[in-house]
Amino acid sequence: MESQISLRIALVDDVEFITRIKSNPDFWPYEDDIETNKEKVRKTVIDRINSSWYKQYIINLNNDNKTPIGEFHIHLYVEERKSWEIGYCIFPEYQRQGYCFEAGNIILRLAFEDFEAHRVVAMCNAHNEASYRVMEKLGMSREGIFRQELPRGDKWNDQYFYAILDSEYKNNPPF
């Protein structure tokens, strides 16, 4: 099956695009702690693009325009344990079309084959069913629930913790 999307490493030219994603609370409906100060976000994005421990990717449709539809990132979680963390954001109009799963496959391949990860983790609000379904489809296992970890409005929400090991990935890749 032909790929619907492609990933490319984020460059300094992408700072404004990523800043727009990271500072827009509408793109993060399950999180309250989104930094909306664009200057602070821009600085963080630039620092991460220039780092060796944080890899940010632009998700593009494989159409004539290479339409950008979101971002996917992976960063060191615990270096001495060879553990990496992933996260993602797909624009609402492109959600539920398999793009995040496809991007996740690419990122997991990078993590285990290029970055020599032993373990890849991800977390999400327990109410974010679309996100945890992607993680499960990628072969990640729910390892825990951080009870009342995330403030949301006047309530505290649980956060799910997922992981996949290199041996699980190699024995049963999701793609």
Image (cartoon, rainbow, N blue to C red):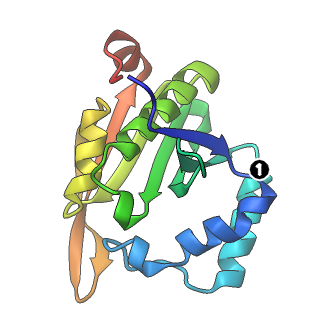
Amino acid type, label 1 = Ser
Residue that appears at 31% across and 15% down: 172
Image quarter for residue 39?
Answer: bottom right
Horizontal and vertical percent position of residue 136: 24, 37
Image-based side of 50 in relation to 122, left or right: right
Q: In this view, does 6 lie above or below 87?
A: above
Q: Is residue 73 above or below residue 121?
A: below
Horizontal and vertical percent position of residue 5: 49, 40
Horizontal and vertical percent position of residue 45: 69, 64
Q: Quadrant of the N terminus?
A: top left
Q: Farthest residue in the top direction?
A: 171
Image-based side of 162 in relation to 12, left or right: left
Dot 1 falls on a residue whose secondary structure is loop
Crowding near the residue tagged with mark 1, few <14, some 14–19, many ≥20 C-alpha atoms within 10 Å: few
Toward the viewer: 99 or 148?
Answer: 99
Image-based side of 50 in relation to 131, left or right: right
Horizontal and vertical percent position of residue 148: 23, 69
Residue that appears at 50% across and 31% down: 106
Residue that appears at 25% across and 35% down: 137
Residue pointed to by mark 1: 51
Toward the viewer: 78 or 110?
Answer: 110
Residue that appears at 23% across and 89% down: 154
